[in-house]
Image (tube, rainbow, N blue to C red):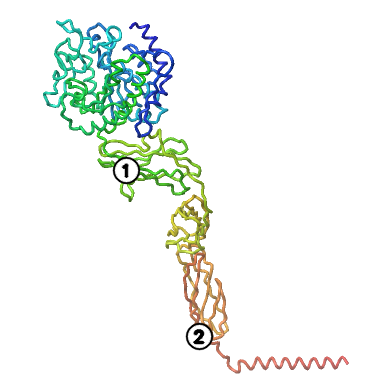
Amino acid sequence: MQTGHAGGRVLSLVVSFVLVSFTLMMAFVPAGDSVRENPLPLSVAAGPPVPYDYSNYTDVELTLTAFQASYPHILSVNDIGDSWETTAGSGNRDILAVKISDNVAVDEDEPELLIMALHHAREWPTTEIAMQFVQSMIVGYGTDARISWLVDNREIWVIPVVNPDGLDYAMSVDDMWRKNRRDIESSPEFGVDLNRNYNGSENGDPAGDWGGVGSSDDPASEVYCGAAPFSEPELQAVRDFVDSHDFQIGIDFHSYGELVLWPWCYNSNITADNEDLIRIGNELAAVNGYTATQGIDLYPTTGDSTDWLYGHSNIFAYCIEVGSNTDGFHPPYKHDVDRILSQNVPVAILASELCGDKYGRAFDMVHSPPGSLNYSISGWELSVNITAARGVDTSALSLFIRVDSSPWSQVPLQVTASNDTYAGLVSPLPAGSTIDYYFVAKDLGGVERMLPSYSPYEVFTATVLAPASDPPVADAGGDAVVAMGVSCALDGSGSYDDVAIESYVWTFEDNGPQTLYGVAPEYTFVSPGVFNITLNVTDGEGQSSIDNVIITVYDGVAPVALAGADGMILTGGSFELNGSESTDNVAIVSWRWTFVYNGSDVVLVGEVMEFIFWTEGVYLITLNVTDAHGNWDAAEVTVTVLLQPIPEFSTILVPVLAVLLALMLCGRFKRRTSRSVK
């Protein structure tokens, strides 16, 4: 076709894709983990059937270029080689490979899928399937959970046209042309059957070698296998491309026959992976409604893509013959092509999913979502049961959490006491918070699973409920006096709650902030003083209460008592008791003197005291001093009391007589004075 015509058709094609893509996806994409078939309804409009406008190579190239411009973050178009006419200088057609992945410019360690179409020039619906599959993946990204997850977790490669020269020739000259357009030297014939030009089964069985059954060495034959394996530049490009990747599953779309075929195709021998090939083949056939069978059951072939992909690279390869016998190679009407698309685009989507573990070994994750979480000051454990036939990789288990649409955070999963159960801790959150979460696990084979399956596009959600009970009542116990350096036991056992107290937190200052936990923690104070300690108790719903206790801490250093020097006095004399020289590092608050006097206990209180002794004797007096922290010391002082000596008689008589004489004389003088007055 001419470029102008192609450009117009491409614009029309792109507009058409955009208008119908979501409708097609809803028909194509199975929901969740289940597989369903929901083909597009056939056109029942009145009037003649609408012809289908198939895409030629230029249409495909321009459409892919437009896709890349619109979705550069998830789609890239890559030139992996040339067609025969391009190498001969008579054409300009590349072998284009489309990559679809979230980090499209990066070669990530993700499972890879290969989709190929149009090995045979006349099988036009296969290119339409490939293009619609590409369209569904890029338009569905960000809107459809399953497709979004697949784009994020797979590297999907699509070669919509393996045989570009043949496609354009069939569409413009001979619509039944099958081969490529090689001009065979020394022959009037053209073309090699590209699906007979692969290097056979490569399994060591000569029967499966290139050029064997189902192919021909006659250039005039439609199944001409070429001069040698990979003689054609188109397949050299495919070969080198496959060798540079690690594809797990490969699908090669052909028409027609409504068949899903797997190796071997050259004879009825079965492969080493026959059970798994059958399992996947049946799953694919359950989607499009086709017959699933080994390739040999159609007819024997050698040099085909199916046997080579499996034998060469252990790719689980399938040839899918699309369309019915009535449809033929390229049905002319839109309703027929739409039916074929609706049958087979979901097959490619399912293959994208299955390539994550082509061996399909048991790997299950089970979780019972709570829906809501009772408020808890200690947070919550979210657990999942994980079993895997290959064993669980316990180093690669994670819980991803998002609170109120905040960014995702990752929490490692730890094995619990229950077998196969792993739990992650969610930190405490306010009532009313919404938690979105999902689990990620790997088995020992490196296969990754998520729960829900298409996380984070599907997630579990839970809401934190408000507290439903009364708040607790804190009781910090009674005040106490303790010595510095001696362990002190706090006691919050009197606290109570109508649910359950989950947290006891004690806070105070002792040479800096101190925090203790538990009902009855012990603490050794490092400084003396009076400490106001706060107990905060919190119940399972996050409600709290506080109480305080006063702890007086004395330093434990005793004062030094000094009771003064011993002394001697006479009876009737006063003796000063002096404790003023007693010392302490804080302050002495009490001086207490005790002794026995005349058979009775005497107690004197004061720093300096006096006492009159009337009775002779030797008195041992004890001084007890006490400081502000309750520390004490004692000292003794001895007081010796001697009897007062009795004076001689003459010494006493003379003063007495003198006194009496004076008194008498005084009396006579008074009498004379009184008589003379008269």
* Residue 117 in the image, given as x and y percentages of width and height: 28, 19
Tell me where residue 397 sits by quadrant: top left
Left or right: 616 with respect to 148? right
The amino acid at mark 2 is Gly
Q: Which quadrant of the rendered structure holds the N terminus? A: top left
| Circle 2 or circle 1, nearest the eye | 1
Front-most of residues 253 and 414: 253
Q: Which mark is residue 617?
A: 2
390 lies above or below 505: above
Do the numbered discs 2 and 1 sit on residues whose CB atoms are within 8 Å?
no
* Residue 12 in the image, given as x and y percentages of width and height: 41, 13
**Residue at the (31%, 36%) spot, across then down:** 448
Mark with earlier residue (2, 1):
1
Front-most of residues 320 and 505: 320
Tell me where residue 200 sits by quadrant: top left
**Residue at the (35%, 12%) spot, across then down:** 59
The amino acid at mark 1 is Ile
Determine the secondary structure under disc 1. Answer: strand
* Residue 264 in the image, given as x and y percentages of width and height: 18, 26
491 lies above or below 9: below
Left or right: 110 with respect to 638? left
Q: Which mark is residue 386?
A: 1
Determine the secondary structure under disc 2. Answer: strand
Separation of residues labelled 2 and 1 (CA atoms): 96 Å
Q: Which quadrant of the rendered structure holds the C terminus? A: bottom right
308 lies above or below 650: above
